[in-house]
Image: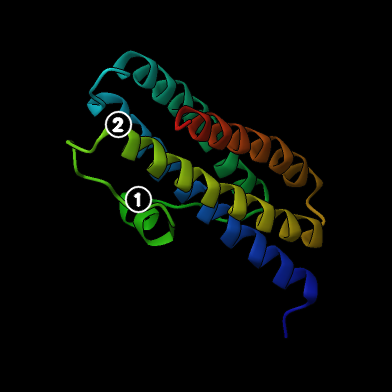
Amino acid sequence: MASAGDNSKTALIEGLNGLLADHMALYFKTKNFHWHVKGPRFRDLHLLFDEQAVEIRDQIDDIGERVRKNGELTLTSIGSVAKHTQIKDQDDTSLAAEDMVRELRDDNQKMVERLKELKKHAEAAGDNATDGLLDDWTDMAEERVWFLDSTLG
């Protein structure tokens, strides 16, 4: 029978791999929008999307390493990312700029919710290092939501 600690660690690892999948999917989507945004706000949104993509990308390795430091395995392929992410693909390259902003805002808000849920698992598993990183990642995701929401007026 699994102990409460084992269950907490399992939930933490599943959550971290979900977070890893979300970051990889959101990174690619944000770069997609960076490449395809059009309209009078092109320059501002092109730069904003790129800044946010870099921030998301820079967290990917840290998330994967938290899984490995816990003695577990990370995602291994695009298929495993697709299986574990809550970020929906967007292949429409003619999407209006405002729709891109709304979609990224909503996706980043989903990320905030996942991060907050994951914090409970890190605390229950006694993983102080992950717990501390989650605070920073949550702050970054909340800032992305704020920036995106503020561009909508």
Q: Which residue is mark 1?
A: 77
The residue positioned farthest toward the bottom in the image shown: 1
Helix, strand or loop status at disc 2: helix
Q: Which mark is residue 11?
A: none
Q: Is residue 69 above or below residue 123?
A: above
- To which quarter of the image does residue 50 belong? top left
Helix, strand or loop status at disc 1: loop
C-alpha distance separating marks 1 and 2: 30 Å
Q: Position of residue 88 (x, y in %)?
A: 35, 53
Nearer to the camera, 136 or 78:
136
Q: Which residue is mark 2?
A: 97
Amino acid type for the residue under numbered disc 2: Ala
The residue positioned farthest toward the top in the image shown: 43
User: Which residue is at a point 51% across and 56% down the rendered structure image?
Assistant: 18
Amino acid type for the residue under numbered disc 1: Ser
User: Which residue is at a point 55% across and 37% down the rendered structure image?
Assistant: 145
Nearer to the camera, 36 or 61:
36
Residue 61 visible in image: no
Give the number of callouts: 2
